[in-house]
Image (cartoon, rainbow, N blue to C red):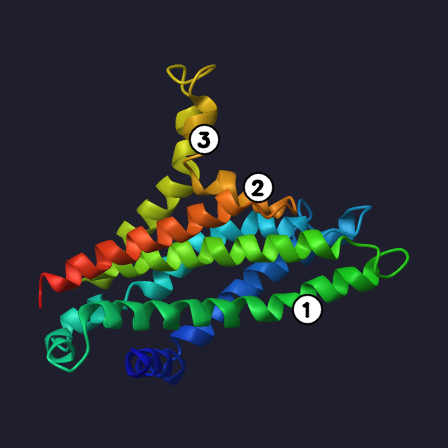
Amino acid sequence: MIAVYRRELSSYFSSMIAYITVGLLLAVLGLVLWVFPDFSLLQTPFASIDALFEIAPLIFIFLIPAFTMRTFAEEKQAATLEILLTRPVTAWQIVLGKYLATITWLFIALLPTVLYVYSIYQLGSPPGNIDLGQIAASYLGLFFLGSVFCAIGVFASSLTANQIVAFVLAVFLCFILYYGFYFMSRLAAFTGSLDALVESLGIDFHYHSISRGVIDTRDVMYFICLIGLSLTWTWVSIEKRN
């Protein structure tokens, strides 16, 4: 597994894909937080970084599938997956190694955004007048959210040899799991009786719960279970080719 992890991580940073995706994330978040007037922190009377955690999920829905679409699709297209499966490594170790490489990229991508937090920290009156505890919880929720999207992206990539198809499928699944249950709970059939239950099935419900600064074990277990299911389905998809 470690060999697969190192191989995958090396392939990310030996090409431009990791640098481009990290650069896009920082550029879009920078424009939203400092330039666009509807979200700009310079236009608000309070020192708050909440806009980052509001817009980041929408960016992740498109950015993470664009990064993970090559995980298995490229291996299939180049016919190297069969070679990899003949090595003394199990299908589960391959899946886990590739997934760990994607969340390592995710951690590296989020790390520079701490500069935005430091800027808000200094802009407070007095400096430091922000809730660092809530920000830390929001970062944890954002990392869990990105980890789920990475698992979904890896699963979508394992289903096809076409990277574009993998990207579209991953975007669709991420969008449905994040926004779908919220919109479904607003349907008349669920209003008043099952709306809270249906909404709680969506990722956004648990993400915003953690972002409020309360780390509930139920929210953490939800993310872990969703990651586990996605990786298990990926393993089943790869094991069929073994």
State the CA–CA distance, disc 3 to disc 2.
12 Å
Name which residue lies at 14% across and 82% down: 87
* Left or right position of 203 against 51: left
| Residue type, mark 3 in image | Glu
> Can residue 80 be seen?
yes
* Left or right position of 79 against 60: left
Q: In this view, does 242 lie above or below 89?
A: above
Q: Is mark 1 on a helix, strand or loop?
A: helix
Foreground residue, 222 or 192? 222
The outermost residue toward the right is 126
Q: Position of residue 96 (x, y in %)?
A: 30, 68
Q: Position of residue 88 (x, y in %)?
A: 16, 82
Residue with the mark numbered 2: 209
Q: In which quarter of the image is residue 79?
A: bottom left
Name which of mark 3 and mark 1 comes first in the sequence: 1
Q: What element carries label 2?
A: helix
> Can residue 160 be seen?
no
Q: Is mark 3 on a helix, strand or loop?
A: helix
Disc on res. 115:
1
Residue with the mark numbered 3: 199
Name which of mark 3 and mark 2 comes first in the sequence: 3
Foreground residue, 98 or 90? 90
Name which residue lies at 40% across and 60% down: 64
